[in-house]
Image (cartoon, helix red, strand yellow):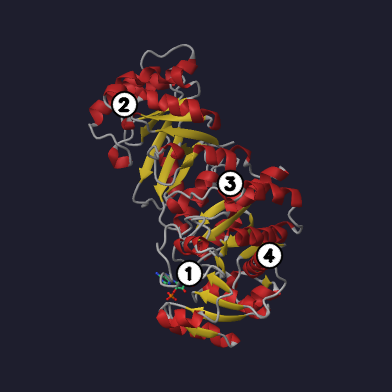
């Protein structure tokens, strides 16, 4: 079973002990990153295993390997020797592991470590991601006995992760640590067990400490959200693919449901650079079902053998799952949006409703189709006017730009306003897509963004007295439909009300990297 190792990057021993007191319960072991400590505190590392109370890895990471130590090999050797000195017969008072790089040569220090039961982690940090043949590398690195070979590779693409995963199937019986560093490798950390890794490193990110390496997850999130310790060879894997995948409510939603059901399933964020490479990996990991987000809703189509009627007619899938040997595709965005909007308005259709849609991208296309289906009449306004015209012409809707002329047209389409652009979304364009529009307070306003809870646009609408709704409700509704696809049954109502009682604040929006 892969272990969760809390990487301690405090500046003082006291800070690290405080972190352990707070977060040690989520971890199986800790790594003392001596390179992060102030010079004075480096003198007191020998007592750390006793203070920690859980097994500790002793590490002095050099700057060339992604750490902070730059005082030369002599000084580093001294620190390591100091950490391993005066070995105690009670092994709990010694460091359980020492991390030594593959080019580090100090036979006497290694001998001393072995004698007193400190296991050697023989590490290689490939910050450039240049090792191609990782299996051969693993083989060449191990020097003796029960050494644990560790290879941490910076990954820049899904292909790089696939390469590491393929190497993981070699040397199955040998303890090894395989880490894909960086945003595109975060799921290798959650799925460490499936990547054949002896441990995964995590940080106390909520304390604003520096992460030990790029892409490390929060220690508590790994434990409480992903139930890292329960992930085995049999756990069924689900997830969401997208790029960039900065924020998604789905991991929180699905993992919370799985936990309520006590299901042996995990739902993982998969930032993906190439769908074909990822689906090869999905076969290797035996992934059961996927949510698909921007920009892959159309890219996945060639890999999907059968589709629901709606996915077929729209030409985009936001859900794929295995049916026997094939991938089956569906699109739950549309139904999720419609259910959410009608519930918000307390209506069964949109007959005699005049609606403005802001934006003319993929989402707007879906929104326009649904509004047409429900009998509404719409005006589409977009920065790039011809895109608004192209969607509007499908349904005999009006169109315009995000300018005074567009705002004039809105006077006849202001029962409902639906904001579909990315303007105002956390991490994207800040601001307001239509800042000169003055709300009367009578409009019902839906903004499909849910991070932040209220965009500047939605905030303005609320303060003018409008009835408002953000995209959270829609996302939950479409996720419920995805659940029904994945498991061929409705999500239990009791679980849904528990999720709803947690509300939009319950979910964790952080995907590191
Ligand atoms: P999605 O699938 O989420 O709809 P998309 O197809 O890329 O994503 O569409 C993004 C929408 O946000 C478009 O309407 C885009 O306007 P353009 O068609 O003019 O590009 C709109 N958008 C993005 N950034 C914008 C900005 N800074 N100001 C106004 N509109 C913006």
Distance, label 4 to label 1, CA atoms, is 22 Å
Label located before the other in sequence (3 or 4): 4
Q: Is residue 180 above or below residue 390?
A: above
In this view, the residue in front, 464 or 172, is 464
Mark seen at residue 106 = 2
- Can residue 455 be seen at all in this image of the molecule? yes
Quadrant position of ligand 1: bottom left
Frontmost of labels 4 and 1 is 4
Q: Residue at x 51, y 66 (%)?
A: 294
Label located before the other in sequence (2 or 1): 2
Label located before the other in sequence (3 or 2): 2
- Is the residue indicated by label 3 positioned so its CB lies within 8 Å of ligand 1? no
- Is the residue indicated by label 4 positioned so its CB lies within 8 Å of ligand 1? no
- Tell me the residue that label 4 is attached to: 343
Distance, label 4 to label 2, CA atoms, is 69 Å
Distance, label 1 to label 3, CA atoms, is 25 Å
Q: Quadrant of the N terminus?
A: top right
The image position of residue 153, as x and y in percent, is 41, 47
Using the rendered view, name the quadrant where residue 444 is placed.
Answer: bottom right
- Tell me the residue that label 1 is attached to: 421
Distance, label 3 to label 2, CA atoms, is 50 Å
Mark seen at residue 89 = none
- Can residue 144 be seen at all in this image of the molecule? no
In this view, the residue in front, 191 or 258, is 258
């Amino acid at each position: 079973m892969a272990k969760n190792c809390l990487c301690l990057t405090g500046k003082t021993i006291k800070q690290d002990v405080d972190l352990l007191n707070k977060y040690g319960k989520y971890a199986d072991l800790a790594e003392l990153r001596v390179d992060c400590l102030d010079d004075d505190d480096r003198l007191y590392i020998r007592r750390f295993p006793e203070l920690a109370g859980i097994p500790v890895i002793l590490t002095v990471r050099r700057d060339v390997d992604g750490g902070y130590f730059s005082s030369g090999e002599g000084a580093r050797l001294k620190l390591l020797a100091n950490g391993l000195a005066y070995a105690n017969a009670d092994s709990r008072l010694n460091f359980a592991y020492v991390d030594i790089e593959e080019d580090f040569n100090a036979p006497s220090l290694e001998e001393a470590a072995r004698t007193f039961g400190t296991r050697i982690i023989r590490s290689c940090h490939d910050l450039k991601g240049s090792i191609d043949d990782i299996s051969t590398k693993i083989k060449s690195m191990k020097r003796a006995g029960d050494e644990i070979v560790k290879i941490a590779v910076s990954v820049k693409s899904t292909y790089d992760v696939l390469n590491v995963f393929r190497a993981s199937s070699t040397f199955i019986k040998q303890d090894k640590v395989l880490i894909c560093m960086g945003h595109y490798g975060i799921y290798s950390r959650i799925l460490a067990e499936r990547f054949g890794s002896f441990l995964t490193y995590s940080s106390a990110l909520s304390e604003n400490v520096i992460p030990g390496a790029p892409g490390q997850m929060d220690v508590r999130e790994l434990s409480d959200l992903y139930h890292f310790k329960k992930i085995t060879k049999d756990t069924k894997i689900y997830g969401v693919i997208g790029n960039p995948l900065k924020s998604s409510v789905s991991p929180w939603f699905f993992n919370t449901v799985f936990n309520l059901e006590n299901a042996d399933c995990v739902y993982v964020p998969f930032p993906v650079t190439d769908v074909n490479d990822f689906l090869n990996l999905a076969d290797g990991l035996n992934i059961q079902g996927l949510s698909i987000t921007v920009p892959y809703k159309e890219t996945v189509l060639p890999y999907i053998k059968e589709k629901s009627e709606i996915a077929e007619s729209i030409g985009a899938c936001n859900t794929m799952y295995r049916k026997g040997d094939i991938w089956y595709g569906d699109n739950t965005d549309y139904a999720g949006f419609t259910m959410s909007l009608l519930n918000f308005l307390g209506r069964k259709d949109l007959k005699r409703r005049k609606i403005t849609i802001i934006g003319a991208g993929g989402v707007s296309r879906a929104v326009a189709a649904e509004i047409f289906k429900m009998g509404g009449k719409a005006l589409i306004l977009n920065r790039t006017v011809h895109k608004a015209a192209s969607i509007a012409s499908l349904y005999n809707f009006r169109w315009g730009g995000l300018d005074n002329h567009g705002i004039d047209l809105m006077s006849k389409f202001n029962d409902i306003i639906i904001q579909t652009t990315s303007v105002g979304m956390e991490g994207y364009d800040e601001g307001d897509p239509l800042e000169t529009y003055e709300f009367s307070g009578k409009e019902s306003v839906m903004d499909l963004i849910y991070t932040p809870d209220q965009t500047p646009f939605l905030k303005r609408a609320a303060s003018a007295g409008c009835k408002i709704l953000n995209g959270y409700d829609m996302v939950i509704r479409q996720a419920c439909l995805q659940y029904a696809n994945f498991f061929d049954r409705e999500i239990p109502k009791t679980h849904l009300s528990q999720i709803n009682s947690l509300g939009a604040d319950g979910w964790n929006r952080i995907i590191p990297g």
